[in-house]
Image (tube, rainbow, N blue to C red):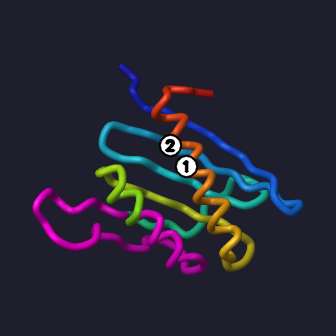
Amino acid sequence: MLKTKIFREMIKEEGKTYLATMIKVKNAYIFLLSEEEERFGTLAVSVPQRPGMAGPPLSSVLLGERNSLLSRMLAESLARRLGKIILLSIFTRQEASREVSHIFLSLIDKLLKKAETGDEP
């Protein structure tokens, strides 16, 4: 039986459109965050620490360099929060600002709420 679930959200801010897609599978989440159109960008992966282990989740940037710090931080935070493997891609035309970071965080929260309530597209 198919268990993969896909959720989407969009926000328009300051004349730009920000998109988020979340793919949920049994042991992982994939987040695609982008500006203006769905595109693949800097990709980070994070694996949560095993129970009883100290320290942050293990993470790495697999592809790209623009927004590498933001993608890695978000992936680590989500791995800690959700306890699953996280793949997270961020595409923006230039380095993400603090405002864009907050927009992406808001989109992620909306996606996770949709997943909790089972609201599928």
Give the answer, above or below, for where 109 lies relative to 62: above
* 28 or 110, nearer to the observer: 110
Residue 30 image offset from top left, x and y in percent: 46, 50
Quickly name the residue at label 2. Answer: 112
At 72% from the left edge and 46% from the top edge, which residue is drawn? Answer: 10
Could you say which quadrant of the image residue 92 lies in?
A: bottom right
Give the answer, above or below, for where 21 lies relative to 97: above
Classify mark 1: helix, strand or loop.
Answer: helix
- What stretch of residues is rendered in magenta? 46-75
Give the answer, above or below, for where 14 lies relative to 56: above
Indicate which disc residue 109 carries.
1
Q: Amino acid at mark 2?
A: Leu
Classify mark 2: helix, strand or loop.
Answer: helix
Crowding at mark 2 (Cα within 10 Å: few <14, some 14-19, many 20+): some
Residue 50 image offset from top left, x and y in percent: 16, 59
* 111 or 60, nearer to the observer: 111
At 43% from the left edge and 71% from the top edge, which residue is drawn? Answer: 62
Callout 1–callout 2 Cβ contact below 8 Å: yes
Could you say which quadrant of the image residue 54 lies in?
A: bottom left
Indicate which disc residue 76 carries.
none
Residue 91 located left or right of residue 6: right
